[in-house]
Amino acid sequence: MIGLRSAVFNIVIIGWFFLVAGLLLPVTLLPRAAAWWVVEFWAHSSLFLMRVICGIRLEVRGRENLPTSGGYILAAKHQSALETLAFLTIARRPAYILKRELLFLPLFGYYLWRFGQIAVKRGAGQKAIHSVGKAALPVLAAGRPIVIFPQGTRTDPGTHRPYRGGVQHLARLSGVPVVPAALNSGVFWGRNAFRKYPGTVVIEILPPLTVPAEPRAAFMAALEGAIEPATARLEAAGWASRKPA
């Protein structure tokens, strides 16, 4: 049954994007602020389809830790495509830092560009960090949050990838707080996995961090020290509650 429901969802979610994106394409010609409801509608409706078809529910904890005004950096664990949808419904009109190749996807790439997402060329090293700062500062100055995945890519539950220093560089440049976020989405919707397992995905927003005037390593250790233990706790609860295949 899980396999069948997963197959239906994988087909429906792709078709739903192209249906919404195609029918509402004229709306994107409006000023960006007036057209954002298209993105929000797509994200909310996609999460609804996920819940109905796959039985995956979303629980968000710690919303009170999100700043109520001004820009901030949401530094999150990344385990599946689920959180890229979810943060569109949690943060107000966020800009994601994402790989440049996504801009070349049919229609999807246009929406990324139109709604001010920040594309980075992989492998560009220090040059990429500076280009992100240049693109992100106006976004943060306008009061929009930036979503960044400090490990750079999706990571399976229970595995570790090093945290990259770009988040610290951007926080130092902008002076905005960094809000860590832990989650257990990979337990139910794995990285590049066909099967989606019923259960409750938890995203936990943790207390904000400020970037002190000390070496990068200290801040990165504090960020990792906030996200990783919380993620391990959420993963353990997720594995305990997940139904077998």
Image: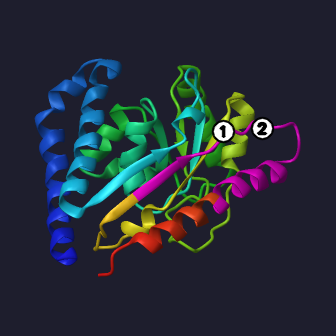
The answer to if 217 sits in the magenta stretch is: yes
Q: Residue lying at the far bottom in this picture: please name it.
A: 245
- Which residue is depicted at the point 15% across and 40% down? 20
- Is residue 191 at least partly visible in the picture? no
Which range is magenta?
201-229
Asked if marks 2 and 1 touch (Cβ < 8 Å), the reply is yes
What's the amino acid at mark 2?
Val
Q: Which residue is mark 2?
A: 211
- Which residue is depicted at the point 14% across and 54% down? 15
Residue 36, image x, y percentages: 31, 27
- Is residue 20 at least partly visible in the picture? yes
Q: What number is the disc on residue 93?
A: none
Count neighbours of disc 1 (C-alpha within 10 A) and say few if under 14, some if 14 to 19, many if 20 or more.
Answer: many
- Which residue is depicted at the point 34% across and 73% down? 193
Total residue callouts: 2
Count neighbours of disc 2 (C-alpha within 10 A) and say few if under 14, some if 14 to 19, many if 20 or more.
Answer: many
Residue 2, image x, y percentages: 22, 75
Quadrant (top left/top right/bottom left/bottom right) for the N terminus: bottom left
Q: Secondary structure at mark 1?
A: strand
User: In this orientation, which residue lies closer to the viewer: 140 or 197?
Assistant: 197
Drawn side of residue 200 relative to residue 79, left or right: left
Task: Judge whether 12 appears above or below 35 on screen.
Answer: below
User: In this orientation, which residue lies closer to the viewer: 7 or 182?
Assistant: 182
Q: Which residue is mark 1?
A: 178
- Which residue is depicted at the point 15% across and 27% down? 26
Quadrant (top left/top right/bottom left/bottom right) for the C terminus: bottom left
What's the amino acid at mark 1?
Val
Residue 170, image x, y percentages: 67, 38
User: In this orientation, which residue lies closer to the viewer: 112 or 128?
Assistant: 112
Q: Earlier in the sequence, mark 2 or mark 1?
A: 1
Q: Secondary structure at mark 2?
A: loop
Drawn side of residue 120 relative to residue 199, left or right: right
